[in-house]
Structures are given as structure tokens and as C-alpha cells.
Amino acid sequence: MKIKKMLIVLAGIVLIAFLWIYLRFLGSHKIEKEKEMEAEAISVMAPYEVKQYQTVLKEIGEAYSQKSGNKKIEFEFIPEENIKKELLLRNLNKKNEVDMVICANTLMPELIRMGFFQELSVDQNTHQRVRQQTLWNSVKENGKIYGIPFTCDPYVLFYWKDRMEEKNLKCPETWDEFEKCGKSMQKLGIKSIGIPGRREDDFSCIFRIMLYSSGGNFLSMDQEAGIQTFERIQRMVRQNLIDREMINYTPKDLAVEFAEGKINMMINQMSMSALLRESDAASEIGVSRLPDDVAGSIFLYGENVGIMQDADSQTKEFLEFLIRKENAEKIVNEMGILSPFINVAYAKTGEVYLEDGEELFKDAKTMETYATWTRMSEDIAQGMYEIIEEYRADPKETARGVHDKVRISIMEG
């Protein structure tokens, strides 16, 4: 009997051991299967927070995936200001599962310098498709190409047409006229001028436009144009033309506030017109170029796209698919932006568009690129915050301080 009991116990132990091994096998098999499925997808990191932008990219991704032998495209939408941090964190944790990155053309040179992107072999046809050849500068280092220009999304002026007409105002063409317009439309409970300031890149890009359009540049910020730009910002804040709350707004936040009629005019990127088209605007929204004094104010900010070091050849195939004419047209139509590619016209979609949008390229400029832009952007934005927040801030001293920091960053880059 004892032997029989022992055999039963032993059989039970063997059965339990077998079940444990079998379950372990199933678990490991499932993990392997999941890894295989992940490997069969191309992961794209993109900065778009507006639903319309996400939708058009997903549709293009699905169109690519439906073709036999093509991988699935998975998009991960991350706020622009977090892209560098996310890539660094994943690199540190050895989890670089991203294959492609769409990011601001101001950030791209820094990411190239950090070694995230692989060198691309770009044929002459693709090279010549880009309208302004200087757009290639932000994807190049030492003569090698690490990305493709993807969108052009300049900052423009949005305003309520009826409020302008009510005060017999015309769209401002200079920064002095811009201030006067803001004063004339001032009304209790309504913000006169909106500027997105939560992201340092937006704040510093707008300052850069005001500085350069007034005849200044980063190497002369401590001189007349730089000092006057800080003085102008300080004056508009003190006269309640610019609300201090603006430093808490992203471009999307600001566009939502504007659409609700809480702001008379706003400086924002052209792509926000797509969001405004979907809003229930009470009256007609106007879109125009930003004011300028001597040097023009249309600068081709936008996004570039790059392929990560460990990505395979099919990621390059998807990149080529993404920038095809028909897909570039879809992106322009849905996002309300300019395309960097020839034969892809600006779309006057809906009721919110820039009348001379297609003409912008004649006057548009590309900015110098810097591998130290993040640090420069932080220093410029800090100067803006100082002017806005500190009542006793001296524009002359602020301009000198920011100038010194930015000059060092440029030299170190």
C-alpha cells in the first residue's frame, strides 16, 4: 500500500512538473510571438497633438500596410518638447524600438549630432523636389544627409475680421501697427494678443521672427534690434495687450481659446488653421503674414523626418511612400500647411486659410541651423519670461545677458 501511495504521489508530482513546464513554454512562446509581431511593425514617433493631423498620418500608414509584404505602421504621438527626452531615455534603457522620427526642423540638427539617425542616400530627383534647397541644411551634417524636409509650418497672424472692421482697422503690416491694432481692439474680458509660450521653442521662435524681421540677428542681440524687441514685448505686457497667462499655453491651447472668441489676434503656426476650421467660430477668421519692419517675417519652420540607426530597409521604403505627391497633398489639405515639395500646392480648404499662401515661398526664408538650439531656445525663452514676469526687468540688460549666453552656445556648436 505504501508503494502504491508513493507511486500516486510521484505521479502527481510529475504531472504538476509537466504542467509547470508546459505553461512556461506557452508563456515564452507568447512572448516570442509578441516580439515577432513588434518586429513586423514600423514604429513612427511624431509630435502631432491635433486629432486631424494624427488621422491623416494613420490613413497613410494603413494604405502602406495594406500592400502585400509591407509591415504595419504604428504611430506614437508625443508632444514636441518631449521627443528629445524620450529618445534619450529609451537609448539609456536600451529600448530603442522607434524606427522613424518626425520632429521640428529646429531640433533635427541636435538629434543628428547625437547620432540617432542613419545616413540616407537621397537621389537627385528627391533632392530637386524640395522647393527651397536651403531646407536641406537642417538635415545635413558634414555634407551627409540624415533626413528629409517634411512640412513647412510658418508662424502667421490669425484675427477676427469683424472686430477689425468694427474699428476700421486694416491688417497690421509693421510691428508698430500690430501694437496699435491691439490697443484699438482692447475690450474688457477679451485678451487682445495671444502668443504661445508654454513651450520654449515656440516662445524663442516668435522672438527670433520679431528680431530678424526688425533687422537683427543672434549675434547682435545686445544692439538696437534686440533691445527694441525686448522693449516691445515688455511694453505690450504692461499695456495688457499680451496677457501673462499666455506663458501657460501651447499652440493648441491658444488656438482653442482663440476659437472661443476670447482673443482678438494670435500669433500661431499655420497648421492651427486646421483646428480652427473644425471649430464653431461665431464669425469669419482672417489669416495673414506676420508684421515686419525691414527684413520680412516668413520663416519656414516645420518638420523633418529621419530614420533611426537600427531601422531596416522597409522603413526607408515607407519614408519614400510618405513623401509621395499624393500623400504630401493629403497632409497639406488636412493640416492647412505648406509643403516643401514642388507641385504640391497650398490648399485653401474650408473658411480659414491664408489668401496668398502659395505666394509665401517667394518671400520665405530658412533660418540658420544650430546643433545647440535646445540650449539657445532655453536662454531666449528665459529672457522672455524675465521681461514678462519681472516688473523691474531692464530690456537692455536682458538683451545683453541673453546675447552672451546665445553667443557661447553658437560658438560651442
Image (cartoon, rainbow, N blue to C red):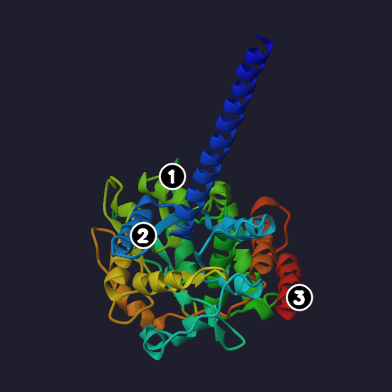
Q: 10 Å neighbourhood of mark 1: few (<14), some, or many (≥20)?
A: some
- Which quadrant of the figure contains the N terminus? top right
Compared across the picture, whether 155 is left or right of 349 comes to right
Which residue is under mark 3? 408
Q: Residue at x 62, y 76 (%)?
A: 225
> Could you say where residue 407 lies in the image, as x and y percent from the top left?
73, 77
> Could you say where residue 107 lies in the image, as x and y percent from the top left?
58, 68
Q: Earlier in the sequence, mark 2 or mark 3?
A: 2
- Front label number (1 vs 3): 3
Q: Amino acid at mark 3?
A: Ile
Rounded to the nearest whole Å, what is the CA distance between mark 2 and mark 3? 39 Å
Q: Amino acid at mark 1?
A: Ile
Identify the element where label 1 is drawn.
Answer: loop
- Res. 340 image quadrant: bottom left
> Could you say where residue 142 lies in the image, as x and y percent from the top left?
62, 87
Q: Earlier in the sequence, mark 1 or mark 2?
A: 2
Compared across the picture, whether 300 is left or right of 82 comes to left
Q: 10 Å neighbourhood of mark 3: few (<14), some, or many (≥20)?
A: few
- 322 or 19, which is in the foreground? 19
Which residue is under mark 2? 57
Which residue is under mark 1? 190
Compared across the picture, whether 371 is left or right of 292 comes to right
Identify the element where label 3 is drawn.
Answer: helix
